[in-house]
Structures are given as C-alpha cells and as structure tokens.
Amino acid sequence: MPLESTMLCLDNSDWMRNSDYAPSRLESQQDAASIICNDRIHSNPENTVGILTMAGNGVDLLVSPTEEASKILASFASVAIGGKSDLATSVQIAQLALKHRKNKNGGQRIVAFVGGPVFETKEKLMKIGKQLKKNNVAIDIISIGEMEDNSEKLLEFVNATNSNDNSHLITVPPGVNPVNAIQSSPIMHLGGNVGGAGMDMGGGGGGAPAGGAGGGGGEDFDMYGGINPDLDPELAMAIRVSAEEARAREEDRSKAAGDEAGASSSGEGVVAESTAASGGEGGAEKGSDVSGVFGGMGADDEEDEEALMQRALEMSMKEMSTTAVAAAGDSAPATDTAAGVDSTTADDEDEDLAAALQLSMAGSA
C-alpha cells in the first residue's frame, strides 16, 4: 500500500445509541474503525492515523496523525455519546490536521462515519468537497444509519471530492456487520484504486447507486482460524496456539512413525545377517561331512592296499618255499641221512622266514 495519512472522524451523536447494528451503532463503528486503523498502520510503517469525534460539545481532536497503533486504539475508550454531529466542521478540522502532519510525503485521506442525520445543506457539502479535491484530500464516508435522509447529500459530497476514483461512499444497511462491509469494500483495497463514488453493501435502501465494487473480501486469517485478531485478539491467539500445538503433535507422530520404520528395517537386516551366518555354518558342516566321507573312503583304500600287500607277501612266500624245495631236491647227497638233515634244515628256515614276515606285517598293520 502507498504511503498515506488518514484521519478517522467518529460519530458520537445521540443516534449512535441505536441497536440496529449489533450491539449498537457506536460499538460497531469502533470495531470498523479499529480494522481501518490496523490496516493503515501495518500496511506501511510510515503511515499515520488520527482520530477525532464529531459530536458532543464540539469537534474533539483525540489523536493527531501518529504511527502508534496503541495510542490510537486507546483513544476509543474516551469517546462519549451526546449531542449532534457536525460533519462539515469535522471534515475541515481533519483537513487541517493532515496539513500539519509531520511527514508531508504520501497521500491524505479522511474516513468519516455517519450514523445520525446530516444537518448541512447539499451546497455546503459540495463546496467543502471541491476544496478537498483542490488540496488532493480523498474522503471515504461510511453510512450506518439514517440513510434515507442522508444518501443524496453524502453522494453529492463524495462526487464533488472524487478524483480518479479515490473517494467512496459505503452504505451499510441495518443488520449487516460494518466490519464485513468494510473488509469487502474499496476502502481496504486502496492500492488497486478500485471502487466507485457510491457503494451499497447490502442491497438495502439508501438510494445510492452502486459503483464498481472492489474484488476480494478483505484479509485472510487462516493462521487464526478465520478470526480477525484485531476484533478478538485473545480468541485469535488461542486458536493460533492450538493450531501450532496440533501441528507439533502431527510432526511428532510423523517422526515416531519414521523411527519405527527405520527400526523395523534394521531388524530385517539383522535377521538377514543371522540367516547368512547360519547358512555359512551349515555349509561348513556340510563341508565337514563331505570331507569325512572322502576321508572314510581314503581309509578304506588304505585297508584294501594292506590286504593286497598281505596276499602278495603270502603268495611270494609260497613261491619262495616251492623254489627252495626244488633246489634242495636237485642238490641232495647220495646218502639218505644227509638228505634228511638238509630237508629238515630247509623246513626250519622256511618256518623262520614265514614267522618273520608275519611279524613284519603285524608291525606294519
């Protein structure tokens, strides 16, 4: 939003006691003024807002244009109902307050609430409107009562001040919340320079022609659950804290679920490792079994070789004994005694050789 100084003119006449705008015209006016004040202060850090009242003992300047929102909102508590409002004088004093503002840069705007009869003539209001237009001062008028008597005068006043659609007349019928009407009006969308001279927010009476309505419906308060923090700051803050706590709980649940998923995946890895280890052990056992089988086969071969060797030795012994007998027969002496002695000796030697071979085989086994 561009830099701008704004003066709020509040109607505190006796007509503001009426309750056709719940809870009363005065309180509805203060709620709407709070919305406008916060919008101006927060939209640009150099914006200033001032407050004055139009009825009572006379026009009362409560706060000169300032950047302190707390000072502006605190001034609402000093507004007292009484008397008749003086719109013409109030607008002129507001113009002087804007003229003597500290920061001369930026635009100038007057926002006037009208909840009682307008006693000024149409001609006087048009004259003041032309003066405002000459001094580059825009005006927004919010009509919240006595619309049948005031609509024509107020519309001529706004048309006389209007320059490039910078001034607006907002007519709020009874039963419509002024806050809702303002939030969807060109007053809250000044950066887009939208809207027309007159605007009927409820389709009710007033006779003011409907101008080009601004698009959109005010600010979004999603973080506060749709509650405007300017109207009910305690409720809005409670809703925001509750939403943040719910968001934190949801994040904790998501984190816990992620941790559980990680733990389950790590458990599966441990099971897989144990399975692989058991498989390795099984393979080792199988290997040992195979080696045992082959080892047994080797032992059997050794036994077979020993048996074959024993048989070979026995056959060799038989052949040797047969050869020895044959040789002894060929070389035997003529006498029977000598032959008998030699054969006996040969038999004894064969028996000794056989015993030695058996002992040798027994030792090798």
Image (spheres, rainbow, N blue to C red):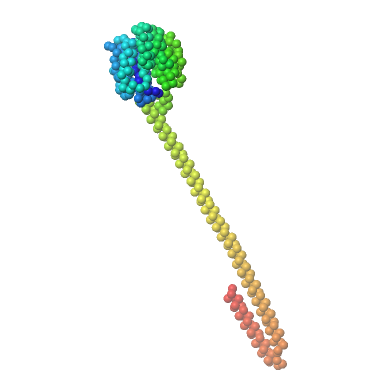
Residue at horizontal 67 percent and vertical 87 percent from the top = 343
As displayed, is residue 287 above or below residue 363?
above
In the picture, measured across the screen, residue 315 lies left or right of residue 118, that is right
Q: Quick check: 271 left or right of 351?
A: left
Q: Residue furthest front?
A: 134
Q: Quadrant of residue 286?
A: bottom right
At 61% from the left and 80% from the top, the residue drawn is 356
Q: Residue furthest bottom?
A: 335
On the image, the x and y values in percent for residue 238 come to 37, 28
Q: Quadrant of residue 70?
A: top left
Can residue 37 be seen here? no
Q: Which residue is found at the position 31% from the left and 14% from the top?
A: 93
* Residue projecting furthest to the left: 57
Instruction: Work out which quarter of the rendered image holds the N terminus and state it.
Output: top left
Expressed as whole percent of the image width and height from the top left, the position of residue 260 reads 46, 41
Residue at screen point 46% across, 15% down:
212
Vertical placement of residue 57 versus 222, above or below = above
Between residue 211 and residue 310, name the one nearer to us: 211
Q: Nearer the viewer, residue 356 or 232?
A: 232
The answer to which of 194 and 60 lies nearer the viewer is: 194
> Percent position (x, y) of residue 273?
51, 50
Q: Position of residue 102 (x, y in %)?
A: 31, 22
The correct choice, above or below, for 2 with respect to 345 in the image is above
How many marks the image carries: the answer is 0
Instruction: Please say if 361 is above or below 277.
Output: below
Q: Quadrant of the C terminus?
A: bottom right
Q: Is residue 105 visible?
A: yes
